[in-house]
Image (cartoon, grey):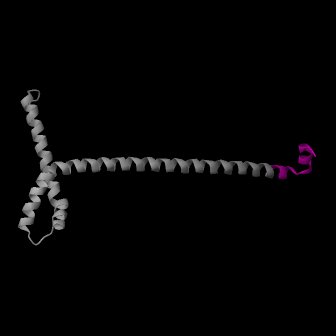
Amino acid sequence: MSLQTKHRNLSTEQVIKNHNARMEAFAQAERDAQAERDRRNTEAGERYRAGLEAKREAERQKMEAAIDTRIEPEKTRIRREWLANHPDKSDAAFEQVWQSHLRPNVVENLERAEGEAAMSRKRASGNYRV
């Protein structure tokens, strides 16, 4: 049976329904494919952002380690002094105080001293006017 004969045997309404059903199936397949592309793009973006965050965290830890190395002599001095002044406290108690209060002050003093040293070098070079 040819397609034309087949269509002649169907009512116009049925032909339109069949066509609309095929078009809806096609449209649904396109929506599904777009949803899958969107999901993949979202996942790729999340992986990229996670990678950036991991990289930033690694850089932050590297900077913190460099700072800790530079302030270690000062920390040792402060630890000895603090433990001498607080004989009832443990080294763990010092570490807690160090992280929350003392370290930020030492880092701030170090940054200030480095800034002042840089300004002194600029002034001494003659290429900078205050």
In the displayed structure, would residue 98 be above or below residue 17? below
Quarter the C terminus occupies: top left
Q: Quadrant of residue 124?
A: top left
Left or right: where 57 falls relative to 123: right
Q: Position of residue 68 (x, y in %)?
A: 19, 51
Q: Nearer the viewer, residue 105 or 55?
A: 55
Region in magenta? 1-16
- Above or below, 122 against 21 in this view is above
In the picture, residue 128 is in which quadrant? top left
* Residue under the point 8% across and 68% down: 86
- In the rendering, at what x and y percent does residue 34 appear? 60, 47
Q: Please say if 42 is above or below 79.
A: above
Vertical arrangement, residue 98 with respect to residue 24, above or below: below
Q: Residue at x 13, y 70 (%)?
A: 89
Asked whether, in this view, residue 117 is left or right of residue 40, the answer is left
Residue 42 position, x and y percent, is: 50, 50
Tally of marks? 0
